[in-house]
Amino acid sequence: MSKIVMKQRPHGFFSECHWLLTRVANEVRNNRAVPDIDSTKAFFLYKNDEQITGDVDLRPHFFNVTTDNIEELPGDVYTYGPTNVMYKADFTDNVNLIDTPITKAMFENVYTPSDHIKTTVKDLLNKYQFDLDKTCYVYYRGNDKLARESLDVPIERYIECLTQAKQNGCDHILIQTDVHDFYESMSEVFDNVSMIDETWIGISQEKHVRKAIHRDLAHNSDILDNISALLSSLLIGAQSNRIVSNTSGFSLFLQLYRCLLYGKLHADDMILYTRDPKISSWESKLPQYK
């Protein structure tokens, strides 16, 4: 059996997950087997000093580590581009290529949530009492990512998509973002908007002390709990009625879980990006909003 070694890198959680996904998928394509994975150095940003020194493997904290035999399963692993596996802004048009027995088994082998994460999801749902059948889950990644033109989607586009979701039975909007002003803006336009406080660091009644899970907060004493809550938030979103998101590693895994683990991918899910790299906004006539 081949082996993948994850090195210590100062990369975000879903960047690490995508790095591993590409290599596992290539191994499955070539050898019809999930490789052995050494992840003791992975998820460096989310370790404290003791965990770094002791080479504590955090992957079992997030995911069940299994190596089920998938050799005889039919299908293939869909790839998009020369190096990125399944990394497309919106792969709903290619769901028949992605939702294959071998891809599903590969994903479940590597990314089935751990019992700890499943418990966190259950606890959050019990606390907030979300009705996921009537929830539109929104992911907005801002800050440094807005330097990428493909992510620079104007807020009016989100409003348009959420208006459509509201008209189609989504009474509740659940927002996951690293920009608190985005949450404030959506709350001014729509009723029944919420977010999961546990995905923020330094939470209090004063919004100016809210901090997103980000590189400058690496090795914070609560960072492991916060990133666990963020993954749990993604899993909650993957089970919701609709999703609206800009492109990112988070949105990729949001779609993968939605498609391969929960079977909830919907034709009205919206993955937003600037289609023309020469422009930084959508060119469309939108109605006026309050």
Image (spheres, helix red, strand yellow):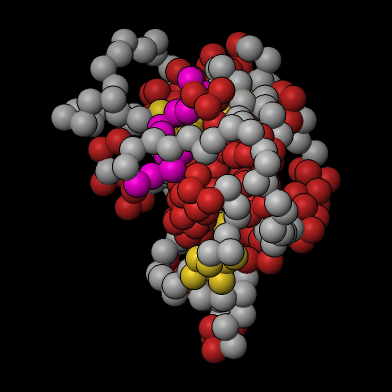
Task: Name which residue lies at 59% across and 32% down.
Answer: 75
* Residue 88 in view of the camera: yes
Question: What secondary structure do most residues of the magenta stretch adopt?
Answer: loop
Task: Name which residue lies at 50% across and 44% down.
Answer: 29
Residue placed most toward the observer, 13 or 65? 65
Q: Position of residue 240 (x, y in %)?
A: 68, 30
User: Which quadrant would the N terminus be assigned to in this image?
Assistant: bottom right
Residue placed most toward the observer, 230 or 266? 266
Task: Name which residue lies at 69% across and 66% down.
Answer: 61
User: Which quadrant would the C terminus be assigned to in this image?
Assistant: top left
Q: How many marks?
A: 0
* Res. 238 image quadrant: top right
Residue placed most toward the observer, 7 or 134? 7
Q: Position of residue 207 (x, y in %)?
A: 52, 53
Depicted 290 relative to depicted 105: above or below: above
Give, as a single range, the part of the protein colored magenta: 83-93
Depicted 274 relative to depicted 61: above or below: above
View extreme (left): residue: 278
* Res. 46 image quadrant: bottom right
Task: Name which residue lies at 16% across and 29% down.
Answer: 278
Q: Position of residue 63 (x, y in %)?
A: 68, 58
* Residue 21 in view of the camera: no
Q: Position of residue 285 (x, y in %)?
A: 31, 10
